[in-house]
Image (cartoon, rainbow, N blue to C red):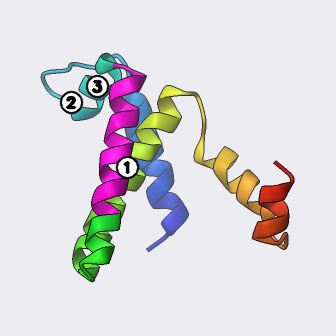
Amino acid sequence: MDKAEILDRLESVIASRKGGDTDKSYVAKLFAKGRKKIAQKVGEEGVETALAAVMDDKQEVVAESADLLFHLMVLWADMDISPDDIFEELARREGISGIDEKNAR
């Protein structure tokens, strides 16, 4: 399983749904509802992931994490952010203490 390939395919599918038929595509429906709704879904999925973790339900954390990542990618697409932008930021932070990085903001 090529992890980067999966993200690339998902990024392409999400991009292809912008302006699509809202009767046939959940992603098109999210885009049509706007950034506020997309961000709300990211928040909901984040909370659901955290709650599953608190309940020590590993399979539910996996499922909710997939939902969270999916909705994050929809938000990124809405904001013209690519996964590469995120990876570049992670690479920039590599080797930097989390405390030092946070203090530098």
Residue 47 painted magenta: yes
Residue 30 painted magenta: no
The x and y percentages for residue 75 are 46, 35
Q: Residue at x 40, y 35 (%)?
A: 39
Q: Residue at x 48, y 27 (%)?
A: 78
Mark 1: give few (<14), some (14-19) or many (20+) Cα within 10 Å.
some
Q: Are marks 1 and 2 in contact (CB under 8 Å)?
A: no
- According to the image, label 3 marks what residue? 28
Which image quadrant is residue 38 in? top left
- Quarter of the rendering occupied by the N terminus: bottom left
Which image quadrant is residue 26 in? top left
Q: Are marks 2 and 3 in contact (CB under 8 Å)?
A: yes
Amino acid type at mark 2: Ser
Disc number placed over residue 49 in the picture, else none: none
Q: On screen, 59 above or below 66? A: below
**Residue at mark 3 to residue at mark 1: CA–CA distance:** 14 Å
Mark 2: give few (<14), some (14-19) or many (20+) Cα within 10 Å.
some
Q: Secondary structure at mark 2?
A: loop
Q: Residue at x 31, y 40 (%)?
A: 41
**Residue at mark 2 to residue at mark 3: CA–CA distance:** 5 Å
Q: On screen, 96 above or below 59? A: above
Q: Is residue 50 left or right of residue 86?
A: left
State the residue lying farthest toward the left: 23
Disc number placed over residue 25 in the picture, else none: 2
- According to the image, label 1 marks what residue? 70
What is the span of residues highlighted in magenta in the rendered image?
34-49
The x and y percentages for residue 42 are 38, 44
